[in-house]
């Protein structure tokens, strides 16, 4: 009875000590994250007005993709990739995301016809912000389940803010075209709730698979999260299994938990394996090698030790970025020559690469030697970082360094740092008398809290500035070029931006950046095509023909280049004043095609390697060109 009375008295004292601000902290943090993103987005919309343009991939979603516009049959969504191209086509990157496409299509059909493109761009960005804030809320809930404390409201606040203000999230959130990655993570976190009805779990995971293909790499993370949260509930949040149990009792508890979670594992794994096998059977699992452009993925041709070491660097970069350490700088896309390859063991970058992997190994050994729960927490932490597998170099992908792929790994970074900050909060505010002198002085803990809050403030400023960059194509490209002046793709994109924003088009200045891109990478097909268009603006027919001849055999530019090439010659022949002039033009055309067709045959042979037999291109159709 005395123990019960003492416990009740202690609980009453704890409640009296609870600061009033914790009652509105969840709402305040939610508003903070919304304001952080919405203010820069709305400022950009207000400043640009009707001149606000889609930024990079947004243009593909809001303008060229007829599936999102509602101009195609509903069934075509299942037959096309995310960019509206036939999934079996040689120029498809096989990103099958029908549910995400449906979100854009439904919104477009619900919006009034008077809504402008600029307003639609802003509205879709706002939707992404709402999804991102919901993800932050779910991350905080998972965090409180992994680290049960007397003050879960503070745990949720710390975790939510740490996750929400992460600068690496801006690419996925402020750019509407990156919505698939947010929906995929949202579905994964919902699946981490053991209380979710199995039917809802089935449909949640189905939505995730049809929203973003990278969710298949979230499976280990979801499994480990369910498992560790289940153990924490059995333990009651203690430091070891509840009670003085034997090793056999531990095994029985683990067996009981596994048995309880087994139906969830079966549903998630069954759907995932069906999805993967289905893609293999339909022949849409591999990307056409012609889409592995150096402009986006400069390391894709590496093999052997060279491939292993350079992709180890790529993974290390992503890990450090997840921990708010950026060893290379910010860019909207890290293309050819922005991150040079490693030059042996003497390369100075080997220092931080080795530091990352030694840190992983040491922490793993420490956790495994400590106890079972430390080992499980280490496995949980590692499983969320395993979501970076697509950029490991083991599977074919067109992605190189992409901050949008970092977002899932920041889930555990926010949770574990937030858990540490909550522990510190309790030691200072709630239980100051329980703080042992040998552990840490109160002043040092206060300093830790001050530094943590300062870090969050600085990250918020950095994130807000980054959001502003992502709302303006020219500003984002300039920022990328400032960090990576030898980025071939960014030089090309800035050239395109100069042409679209200057009136009349400043061809001379645009050509300077395009030619710099070509000097960095001579086989950059998209730049050859852009220079061909600039040549037409300058009435330079010879250069137009030379550049187009290089763009036509390329997978990513073939379709558009061939259309413009045909139109060009038809126009030239129609304008010819005499039959002799027409014959001269035809002879010139045939001479060009004798050079282009053999190169095109080589390209078709490569494209056909990754197409089903009934979808392969008949090379004989090229005969009519010659």
Image (cartoon, rainbow, N blue to C red):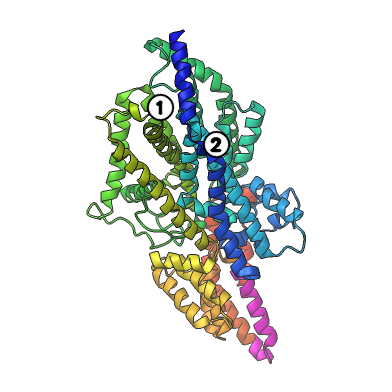
Q: Residue 422 is drawn in which quadrant?
A: top left
Describe the element under mark 1 as helix, strand or loop: helix
Q: Nearer the viewer, residue 243 or 57?
A: 243
Residue 112 lies, in percent from the top left, at 77, 59
Residue 261 lies, in percent from the top left, at 54, 22
Describe the element under mark 2 as helix, strand or loop: helix
| Residue at left offset 35%, top offset 30% | 432
Up the image or down, 156 lies above or below 607; here it is above
In the picture, measured across the screen, residue 279 lies left or right of residue 359, that is right
Up the image or down, 161 lies above or below 575; here it is above
Residue 539 lies, in percent from the top left, at 57, 86
| Residue at left offset 49%, top offset 31% | 152
The disc label shown at residue 376, or none: 1
Q: Which residue is mark 2?
A: 23
Residue 83 at least partly seen: no
In the picture, measured across the screen, residue 249 lies left or right of residue 107, that is left
- Spatial CA span between label 1 and label 2: 33 Å
Residue 570 lies, in percent from the top left, at 67, 79
Task: Give the residues in magenta.
Answer: 560-582
Quarter containing the C terminus: bottom right
Up the image or down, 577 lies above or below 523; here it is below
**Magenta segment: does it hold 50?**
no
């Amino acid at each position: 009875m005395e123990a019960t009375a003492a416990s009740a008295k202690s609980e009453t004292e704890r409640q009296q000590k609870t600061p009033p601000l914790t009652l509105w902290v969840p709402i305040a943090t939610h508003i903070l994250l919304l304001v952080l993103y919405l203010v820069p987005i709305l400022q950009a919309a207000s400043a640009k007005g009707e001149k606000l343009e889609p930024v990079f991939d947004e243009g593909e979603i809001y303008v060229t993709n007829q599936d999102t516009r509602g101009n195609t049959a509903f069934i075509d969504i299942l037959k096309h990739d995310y960019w509206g191209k036939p999934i079996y086509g040689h120029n498809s990157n096989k990103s099958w995301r029908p549910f995400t496409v449906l979100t854009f299509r439904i919104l477009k059909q619900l919006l009034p016809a008077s809504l402008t493109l600029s307003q639609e761009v802003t509205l879709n960005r706002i939707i992404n912000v709402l999804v991102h804030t919901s993800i932050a809320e779910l991350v905080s809930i998972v965090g409180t389940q992994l680290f049960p404390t007397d003050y879960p409201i503070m745990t949720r606040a710390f975790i939510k803010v740490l996750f929400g203000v992460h600068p690496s999230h801006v690419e996925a959130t402020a750019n509407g075209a990156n919505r698939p990655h947010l929906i995929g993570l949202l579905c994964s976190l919902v699946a981490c709730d053991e209380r979710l009805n199995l039917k809802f779990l089935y449909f949640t995971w189905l939505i995730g698979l049809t929203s973003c293909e990278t969710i298949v790499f979230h499976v280990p993370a979801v499994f480990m999260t369910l498992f560790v949260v289940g153990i924490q509930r059995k333990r009651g949040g203690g430091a070891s299994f509840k009670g003085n149990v034997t090793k056999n009792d531990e095994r029985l508890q683990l067996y009981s938990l596994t048995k309880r979670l087994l139906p969830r594992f079966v549903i998630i794994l069954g759907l995932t394996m069906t999805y993967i096998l289905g893609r293999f059977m339909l022949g849409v699992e591999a990307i056409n090698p012609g889409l592995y452009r150096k402009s986006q993925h400069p390391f894709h041709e590496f093999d052997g030790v060279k491939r292993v070491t350079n992709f180890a660097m790529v993974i290390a970069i992503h890990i450090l970025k997840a921990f708010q350490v950026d060893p290379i700088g910010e860019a909207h896309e890290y293309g050819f020559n922005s991150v040079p390859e490693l030059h042996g063991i003497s390369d100075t970058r080997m220092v931080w690469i080795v530091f990352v992997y030694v840190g992983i190994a040491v922490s793993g050994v420490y956790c495994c030697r400590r106890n079972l729960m430390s080992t499980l927490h280490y496995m949980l932490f590692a499983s969320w970082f395993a979501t970076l597998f697509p950029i490991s170099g083991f599977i074919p992908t067109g992605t190189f360094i992409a901050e949008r792929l970092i977002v899932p790994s920041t889930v555990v970074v926010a949770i574990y740092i937030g858990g540490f900050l909550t522990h510190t909060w309790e030691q200072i505010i709630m239980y100051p008398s329980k703080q042992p002198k040998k552990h840490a002085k109160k002043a040092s803990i206060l300093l830790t809290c001050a530094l943590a809050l300062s870090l969050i403030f600085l990250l918020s400023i950095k994130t807000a500035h980054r959001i502003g960059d992502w709302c303006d194509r020219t500003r984002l490209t300039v920022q990328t070029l400032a960090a990576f002046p030898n980025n071939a793709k960014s030089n090309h994109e800035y050239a395109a931006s100069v042409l679209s924003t200057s009136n009349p088009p400043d061809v001379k200045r645009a050509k300077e950046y395009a030619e710099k891109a070509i000097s960095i990478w001579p086989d950059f097909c998209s730049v050859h095509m852009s220079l061909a268009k600039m040549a037409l603006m300058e009435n330079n027919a010879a250069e137009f023909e030379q550049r187009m001849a290089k763009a036509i055999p390329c997978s990513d530019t073939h379709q558009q280049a061939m259309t413009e090439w045909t139109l060009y010659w038809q126009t030239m022949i129609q304008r010819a004043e005499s039959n002799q002039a027409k014959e001269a033009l035809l002879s010139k055309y045939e001479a060009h095609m004798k050079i282009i067709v053999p190169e095109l045959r080589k390209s078709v042979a490569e494209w056909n390697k990754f197409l089903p037999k009934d979808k392969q291109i008949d090379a004989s159709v090229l005969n009519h060109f010659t």
